[in-house]
């Protein structure tokens, strides 16, 4: 009997980068056993539409009990647990296939937004207790990360499978020529993602009631 599966997704590099921290982290955790579950990592293309096709294939192949999607967010200094995905594709730059949707819905006629079903406040508290910078984020953007986050939440709504999205800072190697950009070591992000998964598995559908909002 196989162990329960945690599906962990990361993206290929995009926007002129040679690496993507989300895939590096997912690769590092692939095959790991956390609690009673085993992590299965899948790389998604940074392409509107095709990323959701690959996500669908991974969901069918793994039948996971938990899904955590990861993405890169240059300029952020902490692990960002996303609260909400919105039904908008609005690309500032083309994706890796040259597509650049402007003000288009992820799903025509779909709900305006879907919320994470992960215990994001408990996760942030666990990360901070471990000395890893973390925060709740109120926006996953409108590029392929939000596209995947919205599609993931829409697909799993009502299924009982909990899921969500976390943005990661750049790796130090990516920030070498951009000293204004914050970064975190790969080992820190791998350890943090492990804590995210373990906390999500332990807390189930419950969450802590802690302040994590923003004023602006």
Image (cartoon, grey):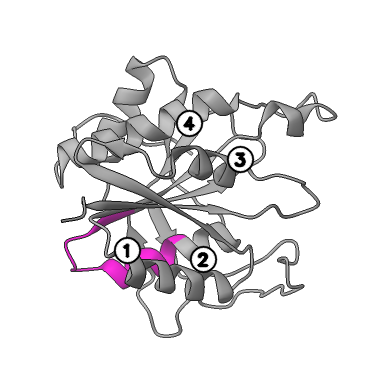
Q: CA distance from mark 4 to mark 2?
A: 24 Å
Q: Earlier in the sequence, mark 4 or mark 2?
A: 2
Report the residue marked by disc 2. Answer: 147
* Residues under numbered marks 4 and 1 in contact, where contact means CB atoms less than 8 Å apart: no
Report the residue marked by disc 1. Answer: 62
Q: Is residue 161 magenta?
A: yes
* Residue 46 drawn above or below residue 129: below
* Residues under numbered marks 2 and 3 in contact, where contact means CB atoms less than 8 Å apart: no
Q: CA distance from mark 2 to mark 1?
A: 21 Å
How far across and down, in percent of the image, does residue 147 sit?
Answer: 51, 66
Q: Residue at x 50, y 37 (%)?
A: 28
Q: Earlier in the sequence, mark 4 or mark 1?
A: 1
Q: CA distance from mark 4 to mark 3?
A: 10 Å
Q: Residue at x 81, y 30 (%)?
A: 178
Q: Is residue 142 visible?
A: no
Q: Nearer the viewer, mark 4 or mark 2?
A: 4
Secondary structure under the numbered disc 2 in the rendered image? helix
Q: Residue at x 44, y 60 (%)?
A: 149
Residue in front for this viewpoint, 126 or 20: 20
Report the residue marked by disc 3. Answer: 21
* Residues under numbered marks 4 and 3 in contact, where contact means CB atoms less than 8 Å apart: no
Quarter residue 170 falls in: top right
| Disc 2 packing (10 Å; few <14; some 14–19; many ≥20) | many
Report the residue marked by disc 4. Answer: 190
Q: Magenta part of the protein: which range?
A: 149-163
């Amino acid at each position: 009997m196989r162990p329960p599966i945690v599906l962990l997704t990361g993206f290929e590099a995009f926007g002129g980068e040679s690496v993507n921290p989300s895939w590096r982290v997912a690769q590092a955790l692939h095959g790991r056993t956390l609690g009673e579950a085993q992590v299965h990592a899948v790389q998604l293309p940074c392409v509107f539409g095709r990323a959701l096709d690959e996500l669908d294939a991974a969901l069918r192949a793994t039948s996971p009990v938990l899904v955590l999607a990861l993405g890169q967010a240059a300029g952020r200094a902490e692990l960002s647990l996303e609260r909400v995905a919105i039904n908008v594709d609005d690309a500032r730059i083309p994706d890796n296939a040259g597509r650049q949707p402007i003000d288009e819905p992820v799903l025509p006629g779909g709900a305006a937004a879907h919320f994470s079903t992960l215990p994001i406040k408990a996760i942030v508290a666990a990360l901070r207790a471990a000395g890893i910078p973390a925060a709740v984020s109120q926006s996953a953007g409108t590029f392929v990360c939000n596209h995947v986050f919205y599609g993931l939440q829409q697909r799993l709504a009502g299924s009982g499978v909990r899921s969500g999205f976390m943005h990661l800072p750049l790796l130090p190697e990516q920030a070498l020529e951009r000293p204004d950009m914050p970064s975190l070591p790969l080992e820190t992000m791998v350890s943090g993602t492990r804590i995210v998964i373990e906390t999500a598995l332990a807390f189930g559908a419950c969450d802590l009631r802690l302040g994590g909002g923003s004023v602006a």
